Image (cartoon, rainbow, N blue to C red):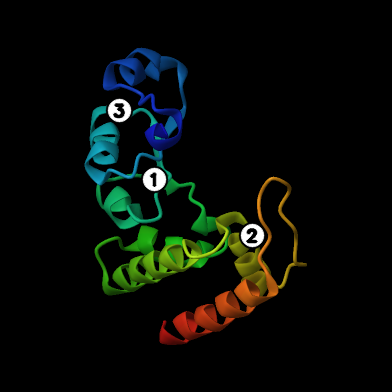
Amino acid sequence: HIPSLTAVPIEDETLRALGPRLAGAKDSGGDPAHTARWVRDHPGLTILSGSDAAAAAHYAAGGRATITMLANVFPEELDRIREDPGGTEAGRAQEFLAAVRSLLGEFPRHAALKHLLHLVSGLPRSSVRPPLDELTPEQTYALETRFTTLRGER
């Protein structure tokens, strides 16, 4: 369910009809109320959230897992949210993820995400494939500088 990309939302009736043949479904629509409704109305399915911004709301509604862009780089932040979605640490983790998402929005997103993965994990730096844009040296410096500041505030 990624209506912003597909322009075709998965309707509740469709999920209800397919439910007996599914193990789960991922909701990347970004609407916490929609995801919570899926969790409530389909208890036999594992409902996954694809929204970093809605992770706390998803877990608070009984969701079991997330598959998000930032979970690839910051799994420990998503764990903090999952463990106690209404807690102080979860709130801090949710704020940190929101700040990182905002930062990524200022750069070629895929290249910036790969660079953050390199910075955080120590994995070798990797490239994006055309037609995606790489970070320029200036963008790399700006991303590293701002991320270091952001991480220090955490």
Q: Which element is circle 3 on? A: loop
Residue at x 48%, y 65% (from the top left corner): 106
Residue 114 percent coordinates (x, y): 65, 61
| Residue linked to disc 1 | 64
Residue 99 percent coordinates (x, y): 39, 70
Q: Mark on residue 77?
A: none
> Quick one: label 2, few (<14), some, or many (20+) residues within 10 Å?
many
Residue at x 39%, y 49% (from the top left corner): 51
Q: Amino acid at mark 2?
A: Ala
Marks 1 and 3, the one that precedes in the sequence = 3
Label 2, label 3: how far apart the Cα atoms are: 36 Å
Residue at x 31%, y 48% (from the top left corner): 58
Q: Which element is circle 1 on? A: loop
Left or right side of 26 for 15: left
Q: Which element is circle 2 on? A: helix
Q: Quadrant of residue 81?
A: bottom left
Label 2, label 1: how far apart the Cα atoms are: 29 Å
Q: Nearer the viewer, mark 2 or mark 3?
A: 2
| Residue linked to disc 3 | 42
